DNA sequence: GCGCGTTATTGAGCGTTGCTCAACAAGCGA
DNA sequence: TCGCTTGTTGAGCAACGCTCAATAACGCGC
């Protein structure tokens, strides 16, 4: 009768808590393997529950993965877009973005690059996040009257930020951080000028 | 005794021909669904053979997928990097790249964006292709003495080309083709200047 | 045309994984 | 203690990746 000596989780959790636990496990696993390799069995074993229970909270594995990706996108949004100061917003945004890549390069890679379009619903989540970042950049520049051409160009600039940021985070020796920031902000200025 | 009335494929093909057939089927399927949903059953049914036979030509499904991706990367390479003229190489490369996206946007998306890092071997293939394009761009600019910083910057510029090219190919009305080319070449020039 | 070795091809079958469903039991009010 | 709600489970099915011994189609010498 001496159960629960070191039970991984107290049985019969309230639903929202269980959901958070499962999404949290998925987020942690996401940093060490691609999302396609996050299997129901592994998550259930890690949570100390049966496979069946996961399907009471998420109708399918795909829906569970979507919940993980949504949570990851929310983290990126929180740490780069929210609570921006009133001055120098573009530079601060870029700095925060690079800081996030420095801390959580794996997470960003897993969510926004690896599975970027395999599933249309996943693509929708990442597209929306990218759109929000583009909007944030445009707002930071005081350019709310964005023409399609300008939005396209800013999106392209953001892709450049992503690519250089990820490569630089993996090998910081290739360039000084300040030089990278200066280069990207300079290119942004140049792009703005070319679109008129 | 009236077999083979309309047999989908003549039985007992020579090995290399069978291989090409299977890779070809995979390439065609790749344009209409993500590679993770290309199942052995579907390919075998399409080819009119049994599942087992596929494993005589590819040791695993993953290896089969790699063969498909390698073939797709070869197509990109052929149509953008080979037989470049001696003058205006950068502009011609960019033009060919955009032309490829206009014709085979789906293929490029499937191979180089969607599954970009889920599998390290897949990532290696795409990384090598991107590296070749960067090398091609550097050679086109007469800059073979590429510092790490310059390579990083050119890689970032290429990401911008990819992003804008893909978005533009999906919605060409957002910008004139010539304006896009001019913008990208102008930004390339600006980037070169900023790296010194 | 007839054996015969080579080998492309197959069918049966196993383990894993996503998913369903009827049944169980933990908590809680009466 | 009874009984209701509901979080939880185990058995089981279908799809899929993969293996292996057996088969049949083709080429070659005669």
Image: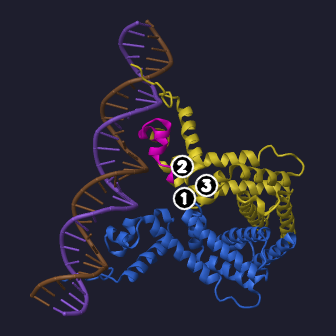
Chain colours: A blue, B yellow, C purple, D brown
One can see residue A96 in this view? yes
Distance Cα–Cα, label 1 vs label 2: 11 Å
Q: Earlier in the sequence, mark 2 or mark 3?
A: 2
Distance Cα–Cα, label 1 vs label 3: 14 Å
Q: What residue would you read off at disc 2?
A: B65
Label 2 neighbourhood size at 10 Å, few (<14), some (14-19), many (20+)?
A: many
Name the side, left or right, on which A137 lies relative to D24: right
* Labels 1 and 2 positioned on one and the same chain: yes
Residue C13, percent from left and from top: 28, 44
Q: Earlier in the sequence, mark 1 or mark 2?
A: 2
- Whether the residues at callouts 2 and 3 have beta carbons within 8 Å, the answer is no
Residue D14 vs A20, above or below: the answer is above
Residue A75, disc: none
Name the side, left or right, on which D19 lies relative to A101: left
Residue D8, percent from left and from top: 29, 75
Query: Residue at the spot x=33%, y=68% of the render?
Result: A51
Q: Pick whichever, B49 or A7, lies toward us.
A: B49
Badge 3: chain ID? B
Query: Residue at the spot x=73%, y=52% of the render?
Result: B102
Q: In the picture, residue A192 is in which quadrant? A: bottom right
- Whether the residues at callouts 1 and 2 have beta carbons within 8 Å, the answer is yes
Q: What residue would you read off at disc 3?
A: B110
Residue A40 vs D17, above or below: the answer is below
Residue sitting at the far right: B87
Secondary element under disc 1, as helix, strand or loop, is loop
Q: Main secondary structure of the magenta part?
A: helix
Q: Earlier in the sequence, mark 1 or mark 3?
A: 3
Residue B119, disc: 1
Residue D28 vs B181, above or below: the answer is above
Q: Which residues are magenta?
A: B37-54
Secondary element under disc 3, as helix, strand or loop, is helix
């Amino acid at each position: 009768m001496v159960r629960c000596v070191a039970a991984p989780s107290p049985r019969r959790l309230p639903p929202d808590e269980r959901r958070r636990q499962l999404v949290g496990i998925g987020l942690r696993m996401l940093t060490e393997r691609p999302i396609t390799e996050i299997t129901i069995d592994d998550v259930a074993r890690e949570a100390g529950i049966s496979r069946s229970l996961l399907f009471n909270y998420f109708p399918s594995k795909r829906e569970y993965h979507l919940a993980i990706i949504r949570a990851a996108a929310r983290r990126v949004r929180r740490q780069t877009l929210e609570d921006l100061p009133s001055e120098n917003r573009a530079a601060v945004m870029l700095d925060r973005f690079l800081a996030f890549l420095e801390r959580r390069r794996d997470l960003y890679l897993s969510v926004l690059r690896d599975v970027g379009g395999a599933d249309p619903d996943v693509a929708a989540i990442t597209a929306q996040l990218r759109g929000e970042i583009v909007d944030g950049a445009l707002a930071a520049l005081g350019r709310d009257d964005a023409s399609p051409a300008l939005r396209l160009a800013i999106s392209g600039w953001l892709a450049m930020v992503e690519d250089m940021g990820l490569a630089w985070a993996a090998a910081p020796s290739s360039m000084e951080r300040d030089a990278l920031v200066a280069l990207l902000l300079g290119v942004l200025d140049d792009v703005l000028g070319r679109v008129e």
